[in-house]
Image (cartoon, rainbow, N blue to C red):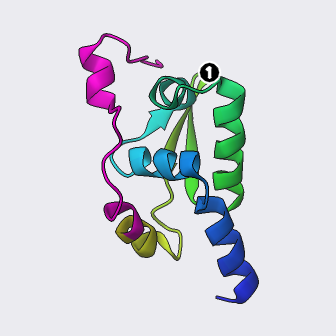
Amino acid sequence: MDYVYMESYLKAISDHNRMLILKYLSKDSLCICEFTELLDMTQPAVSQHMRKLKIAELVTEEKRGRWTIWSLNVRHALYPMLIHLLSLLPEPEITVESLEAEGKRVVCE
């Protein structure tokens, strides 16, 4: 670990929307289209956040047909610290469960 590595890590998580994305991913793997509903953002905006998280190696992606399912990178050296930091944050107002209850959850299969 060096200063440059820590700086890039902290920059990657230092955005409100990226913190929300990481909080959601700490509960379940999700698709971009689910994030568009959860964050009320466009797909390109969510994709830009995911790109930054991927560059920092905080998330992993799995292709399922034409869909990409995102997860936290449990092999990241700072994964335990990330989980701890996320546990300090309150639960998001909109949850995957609330989307399901409203019939708004997108199932990417």
Which of these two is toward me, 107 or 10?
Answer: 10
41 inside magenta stretch: no
Q: Report which quarter residue 10 is drawn in.
A: bottom right
Residue stretch in magenta = 85-109
Q: Is residue 42 above or below residue 23?
A: above
Crowding near the residue tagged with mark 1, few <14, some 14–19, many ≥20 C-alpha atoms within 10 Å: few
Secondary structure under badge 1? loop
Query: Residue 71's spot in the image, x, y percent?
Result: 48, 47
88 over 23 or under it: above or below? below
From the image, tell me which residue sits under label 1: 66
- When the figure is inspected, residue 25 is found, relative to residue 13, above or below; the finding is above
83 with respect to 13 (left or right): left
Residue 106 is a magenta residue: yes
- Which secondary structure type mostly characterizes the magenta part of the structure? loop
Q: Which amino acid does label 1 sit on?
A: Arg
Image quadrant assignment for residue 30 = top left
Report the residue that reaches farthest toward the bottom: 2
Q: Quadrant of the N terminus?
A: bottom right
Residue 58, x across and y down, in percent: 57, 60
Say which residue appears at 47% left-offset and 46% top-offset: 20
Q: Residue at x 71, y 46 (%)?
A: 51
**Residue 57 visible in this rendered orientation of the protein:** no
Residue 40 drawn at (x, y percent):
53, 25
Q: On the rendered structure, is 48 left or right of 14?
A: right
Q: In which quarter of the image is residue 32?
A: top right
Q: Report the residue at 42% width, 47% height from top.
A: 25
Placement of 75 over or under 104, stated as above or below: below
Q: Where is residue 8 in the image (x, y as percent from the top left)?
A: 71, 70
